[in-house]
Amino acid sequence: MLATYDQDGKANAMNTAWGGVYDYNQVYVSLSKHKTTDNLELKKAFTLSFATKKTEKNSNYFGVVSGNKEDKIEKSGVHVTPSKYVDAPIIEEYPLTLECTVESFEAGNLIGNVINVSIDEDYLDENGKIDVDKMEIIAFDMVNNTYRVLGENVGKAFKDGFDL
């Protein structure tokens, strides 16, 4: 979920399916014209939260309803608090949030600098690392128009394959 403030300081959120890691401390999101894109250009800040099994209904709602037509934050019943690091809201119901400033935004391509990562401590393991399985992060399955919980660990990044 990508959340911003508008010119009046009102929070807005949208579901964004197209994006990922751009660099070590940067994210990339592909966006068409929305209320949120106007807010990005105005405030130069946003938060990016990971949808979970628990937040699926609100997450889908944030993607199918326009913030120009209704107050999605109010209607969904979520709670927002201001980020301490960027001029953008944190949606409390989402356990993992990246707090970002806009590095660039051209032709619908947003690159953001990750300034801080907020995590609900209930989703940390005994070593203080994020427990992705416990969080039940979901991803959009565009083939079936469904959301799927990310699953089983199938290998080690940057290790597997060196024995070939």
Image: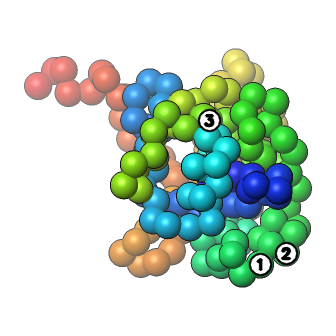
Helix, strand or loop at label 2? It is: helix
Quadrant housing residue 61: bottom right
Q: Residues within 10 Å of mark 1 (few under 14, many from 20)?
A: few
Q: Is residue 149 visible?
A: no
Q: Name the residue under label 3.
A: 100
Q: Is the residue 159 above or below the residue 65 in the image? A: above
Q: Can residue 127 be seen in this view?
A: yes
Q: Do the numbered discs 1 and 2 sit on residues whose CB atoms are within 8 Å?
A: yes
Rendering coords of residue 109 (x, y %): 40, 50
**3D distance between C-alphas at marks 2 and 3:** 25 Å
Which numbered tag is attached to residue 75?
2
Q: Mark 1 points at which residue?
A: 70
Question: Which of the two discs, 1 and 3, labels the residue nearer the N terminus?
Answer: 1
Q: Which amino acid does label 1 sit on?
A: Glu
**3D distance between C-alphas at marks 1 and 2:** 8 Å
Rendering coords of residue 163 (x, y %): 16, 21
Question: Which of the two discs, 1 and 2, labels the residue nearer the N terminus?
Answer: 1
Q: Which amino acid does label 2 sit on?
A: Lys
Rendering coords of residue 95 (x, y %): 74, 44
Q: How crowded is mark 3: few (under 14 residues within 10 Å), some or many (20 or more)?
A: many
Quadrant into which the N terminus falls: bottom right
Q: Do the numbered discs 1 and 3 sit on residues whose CB atoms are within 8 Å?
A: no
Task: Pick the residue in front: 101 or 142.
Answer: 101
Residue depicted at x 20% and y 27%: 161
Task: Pick the residue in front: 130 or 102.
Answer: 102
